[in-house]
């Protein structure tokens, strides 16, 4: 099947996504407060080779060069996040003029390059001062978050039309407050369920506040979605897969759509009741303009007595001997089609936008070039699956590649590289990869792919 950009229509949003902590660096510049990630990277044994993002891609100082690259690649939309502690160093209270000025410069330059900014309000870097008060486990986070949102809207709402509330709440609550492998490194069911409920409240209340302050804005939030299948076609594995699907894919979308938490398929979620206050059921719902779908792979799940709460475990790609990325995520393009179909089947679902999709493969610089054919193939095959879903009537309105630059990949440090652009972290030199050139050509109208 041949396809081109034109097959998606003129209204389709093509873009690239980045996140503040992963690229900005300048972690103490101009009065920025510390975030939970600035703190977490200092703890021994948490990050691959004890790496950190104090400098990262130095995007704070190189945003012009990098925005020019986006323009050169014909990418019309850049989704980036705001570092909460850069503009409100203690998370609440005093606002930093210099922090606001940085995002003003970035937004203005982005627009001047003809690129549309899409702002993610929260991509995992909570101010450490708020974590000292319990962070996402403290219900006051809703008040802190709404104050932060209103400051962003007051300062940037005159120029930014597209707003994304949270990046993948299941990942930052699960990895950060249950497993302890991401910042702030907390563990346990109680921490997790409290964080889930407060994040779900922020997701809806944040949307409501923006709609009130900026009626013309388009408002969305993102969900991490993996296509889930049972490992074997036996009842025990089917049940296990259903539980994992409930946890990973349904936990945040269903309360937002007014359906409440999916407690019937995962009874442990009933314990969220401990954190509910009267009126919360209604507060959890909000009619977003779009839902950001972030998909990388599928997961195969089998029954496991030993795993608490879900009695299920994921069989990793290397155990299954299938083609996988550096993250050990199976390369399975149909997954993006499956999750689009799954989400579009909800009643009252608004437009879907792929706000992240991409892959880490080993890149090698040879004579100043990076021939990353596997990434080109991955993107090509996933975009084709998005078109397949669209042609079957799924209301999908955009696709953003993760990501522009090789950046700080959280607990994995710098070894998994997802960028369309290679970054030498010693010199900060940028080199366009073949995948960047490929995306550039695809976005040039009239260019056809197979
Ligand atoms: C996150 C990104 C991350 C990417 C690849 C998503 O979960 O939003 O910050 O770098 O996946 O792991």
Image (spheres, grey):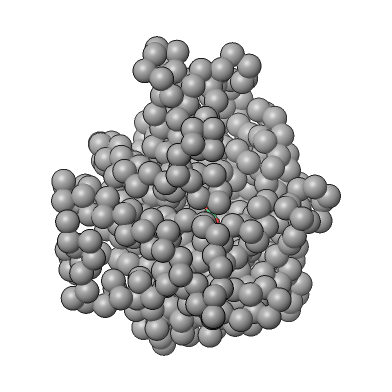
> Which of 61 and 1 lies nearest the eye of the viewer?
1
Q: Position of residue 329 (x, y in %)?
A: 50, 44
Where does the C terminus fall, quadrant-wise?
bottom left
Residue projecting furthest to the right = 44
Q: Position of residue 112 (x, y in %)?
A: 41, 87
> Which of 201 and 231 lies nearest the eye of the viewer?
231
Q: Quadrant of residue 378?
A: bottom left
Q: Position of residue 334 (x, y in %)?
A: 31, 43
Residue occupying the point 34% across, 47% down = 333
Viewed as shown, does residue 390 lie left or right of 88?
left
Q: Position of residue 253 (x, y in %)?
A: 41, 39
Q: Is residue 109 visible?
A: yes
> Which of 419 and 114 lies nearest the eye of the viewer?
419
Is 116 rendered above or below residue 289? below
Where does the N terminus fall, quadrant-wise?
bottom left
Viewed as shown, does residue 378 lie left or right of 13?
right
Please give the count of numbered marks on the rendered protein: 0
Residue occupying the point 35% across, 71% down = 438
Residue occupying the point 26% across, 77% down = 444
Q: Quadrant of residue 277?
A: top right
Q: Quadrant of residue 147?
A: bottom right
Is 102 rendered above or below residue 199? below
Residue occupying the point 42% across, 55% down = 357
């Amino acid at each position: 099947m041949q396809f081109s950009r034109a097959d998606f229509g003129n209204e389709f949003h093509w873009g690239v996504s980045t996140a503040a902590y992963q690229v900005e660096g300048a972690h103490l510049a101009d009065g920025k407060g510390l975030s939970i990630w600035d703190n977490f990277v200092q703890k021994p044994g948490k990050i691959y080779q004890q790496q950190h993002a104090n400098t990262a891609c130095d995007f704070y100082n190189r945003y012009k060069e990098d925005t020019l690259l986006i323009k050169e690649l014909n990418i019309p939309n850049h989704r980036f996040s705001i570092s909460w502690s850069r503009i409100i160093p203690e998370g609440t209270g005093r606002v930093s003029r210099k922090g606001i000025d940085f995002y003003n410069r970035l937004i203005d330059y982005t627009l001047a390059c003809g690129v549309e900014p899409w702002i993610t309000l929260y991509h995992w870097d909570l101010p450490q001062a708020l974590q000292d008060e319990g962070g996402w486990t403290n219900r006051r986070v809703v008040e802190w978050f709404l104050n932060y949102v209103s400051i962003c809207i007051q300062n940037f709402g005159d120029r930014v039309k597209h707003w994304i509330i949270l990046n993948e709440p299941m990942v930052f609550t699960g990895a950060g407050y249950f497993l302890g492998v991401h910042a702030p490194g907390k563990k346990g069911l109680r921490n997790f369920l409290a964080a889930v409920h407060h994040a779900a409240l922020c997701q809806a209340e944040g949307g409501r506040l923006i709609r009130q302050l900026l009626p013309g804005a388009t408002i969305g939030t993102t969900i991490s979605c993996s296509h889930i299948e049972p490992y074997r076609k036996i009842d025990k594995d089917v049940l296990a897969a259903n539980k994992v699907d409930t946890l990973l894919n349904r936990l945040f979308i269903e309360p937002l759509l007014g359906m409440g938490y999916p407690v019937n398929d995962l009874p442990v979620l009933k314990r969220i009741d401990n954190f509910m206050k009267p009126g919360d059921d209604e507060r959890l719902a909000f009619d977003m303009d779009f839902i950001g779908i972030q998909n990388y792979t599928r997961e195969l799940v089998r029954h496991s007595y030993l795993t608490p709460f879900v009695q299920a475990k994921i069989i990793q790609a290397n155990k299954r001997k299938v083609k996988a990325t550096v993250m050990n995520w199976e390369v399975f393009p149909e997954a993006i089609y499956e999750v689009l179909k799954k989400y579009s089947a909800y009643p009252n679902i608004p437009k879907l936008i792929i706000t992240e999709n991409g892959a880490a493969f080993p890149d090698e610089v040879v004579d100043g070039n990076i021939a990353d054919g596997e990434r080109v193939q991955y993107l090509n095959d996933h975009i084709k699956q998005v078109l397949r879903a669209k042609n079957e009537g799924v209301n999908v309105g955009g696709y953003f590649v993760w990501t522009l630059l090789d950046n700080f990949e959280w607990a994995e440090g710098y070894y998994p590289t997802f960028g369309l652009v290679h970054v030498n972290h010693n010199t900060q030199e940028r080199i366009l990869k073949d995948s960047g050139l490929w995306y550039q050509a695809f976005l040039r109208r009239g260019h056809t792919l197979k």
